[in-house]
Image: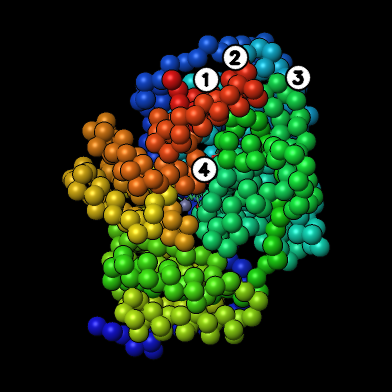
Amino acid sequence: MLLKSSLIRAVSQTKGVITRGYKAKAKKIPEFTQDRYQVSRKSFAAVTDSDVSQFEKTIGSKYVVTDSEELLTHNVDFLKAVRGNSKVVLKPGSTEELSQIMKYCYEKNLAVCPQGGNTGLVGGSVPVFDEIVISLNRMNKIHSIDEMTGIAVADSGVILENLEKSANEHGLVVPLDLGAKASCHIGGNVSTNAGGLRVIRYGSLHGSVLGVESVLANGTVLDLMSNFKKDNTGYHLKHMFIGSEGTLGIISKLAILCPPAPRAFHVAFVGLPSFDAVLQTYLSAKRQLGEILSSCEMMDKDALAAAIQHFGLKAPIDDYPFYMLLETSGSNADHDQEKFNSFLENGMEAGHIVDGTITGDPGKMQEIWKLRELVPVALIEDGYCFKYDISLPLRQFYEIVPVMQERCGSLAHRVCGYGHLGDSNLHLNISCSEFTPEIYKRIEPYVFEYTSKLKGSVSAEHGIGFLKTKYLSYTKADNAIDMMKEVKNLMDPKGILNPYKVLPLN
Ligand code: FAD
Ligand code: 2HG
Ligand code: ZN
């Protein structure tokens, strides 16, 4: 039935910027990665008491962690999918200390695993064996935020939400926003080239990050900081560190270009009858909302059901097969709302949007955002969750979800799809009560073969980490992987930086 536009529930509108956070419940500790995934340890040295004493001299004993309880939090990832067996976590307080640690590790052939907020979803942030964890937690100073240029200079361990708050105080926003913002580090974000909820507006970090300072495998500090958007002086080495997941160097500091904070935000949550209607709505959003569109997210009914079930949320509209969350941000609230309303009315008249709610009230916008942002965590609450962040051609974007529902059958608790439609990035999540080899084999490598046939990407935004090394070749050509190996060899000849990650193991 075609519903009238008056059914769009418009609620009061005020200006404001939303902040979000989450806390995950404790879950079962996984078995060791080396056992679950049958990996062989490379011939790195093992940490000795004399190494620990040396580290204590370099950074102070307080920042050399050997306590087993604290070690566990650094050895296990957020997903509870992988578990390393590191015996020591180091927390340097400056680039100089980090450099000294790396120089020592290089000389002694000790492998290291750089770690930011440990929110990564591909097993890259924790050791596979006994690599030394280098936590960037203490390197958390914001050096400067320049209102005039919009450039923020920060240590890599600054928590994204903290950088965002400081940027807001200067009338700016960080051009990156994701559900893990309360825990992830800006250095972790850059190292993974994180995408998130605003790529449609601000583009990828390859564009926003102006410069980085990086500590190389042998302790050399490479200064690639820059204060300019335009700088065509030869090879752009900074890009090597954006998205290389700690395998080429450890980012210690960076400069990021922050755009002016929009003055008016609006969020709509709409229900749609089919995936085709989702696509049509996306097309209309691009055409009709244009420059003010800042997020275009979709989720299916099972994804929403997970958030509602585990976090006691309430959906603002009735049940539909698909939902979209659209956000606009601009400089004129009246103009934006008028545009948004007319886009929604047109969508309803065309029968693409069946029901919806729109708000500019900060509290209500936050409630709507929770429906989307808590989905990833809710699915982990089901027990165990296999997570895939694939890029797929838009027309075939959702087809894999029913295919996997069929393939997993009763082995899965939920097979659902959601994600950054505006970036062709689907999050296929398959939850079950616990990890079993049986369901794992049903899913992999099938998901990646399917993605590869459609010429998609096996990682749209989370990276390769440990969990996807086997599948890099499903997206990257052999000679490209060979060149990646040469680069790795040049920059880290002993292979001590985050081994067993990104590049195929064999
Ligand atoms: P970590 O998890 O600690 O590390 C990630 C990788 O970067 C590891 O390989 C690590 O070795 C390396 N690394 C970390 N810091 C450094 C450094 N200073 N120098 C060199 N290497 C380093 N990701 C997205 O892209 N988009 C999303 O929308 C998104 N949403 C998420 C929502 C939730 C609820 C969760 C749990 C995760 C989400 N993620 C998302 C994944 C994750 O948050 C990102 O990958 C994030 O960028 C990781 O940052 P981190 O500081 O936690 O890094
Ligand atoms: C998101 O977009 C994140 O919410 C996490 O990238 C996706 O958990 C996932 O699969
Ligand atoms: Zn995502």
**What distance separates the C-alpha of mark 4 from that of mark 1?**
20 Å
Q: Is disc 1 placed on a helix, strand or loop?
A: loop
**What distance separates the C-alpha of mark 2 from that of mark 4?**
26 Å
Say which quadrant the N terminus sits in. bottom left
Q: Which residue is mark 4?
A: 119
Q: Amino acid at mark 3?
A: Lys
Q: Is disc 4 placed on a helix, strand or loop?
A: loop
Position of 404 relative to 66 (above/below): below
Tell me if residue 257 can be seen.
Answer: yes
Q: Which residue is mark 1?
A: 130
The image shows residue 168 at horizontal and vertical percentages of 70, 63
Q: Are marks 3 and 1 in contact (CB under 8 Å)?
A: no
Q: Are marks 1 and 2 in contact (CB under 8 Å)?
A: yes
**What distance separates the C-alpha of mark 1 from that of mark 2?**
8 Å
**Image quadrant where residue 234 sits:** top right
Q: Are marks 2 and 3 in contact (CB under 8 Å)?
A: no
Crowd around label 4: few <14 · some 14–19 · many ≥20 (10 Å) = many
Q: Is disc 2 placed on a helix, strand or loop?
A: loop
Q: Which mark is residue 97?
A: none
Mark 2 vs mark 3: in front: 2
Q: Nearer the viewer, residue 318 or 153?
A: 153
Q: Amino acid at mark 2?
A: Val
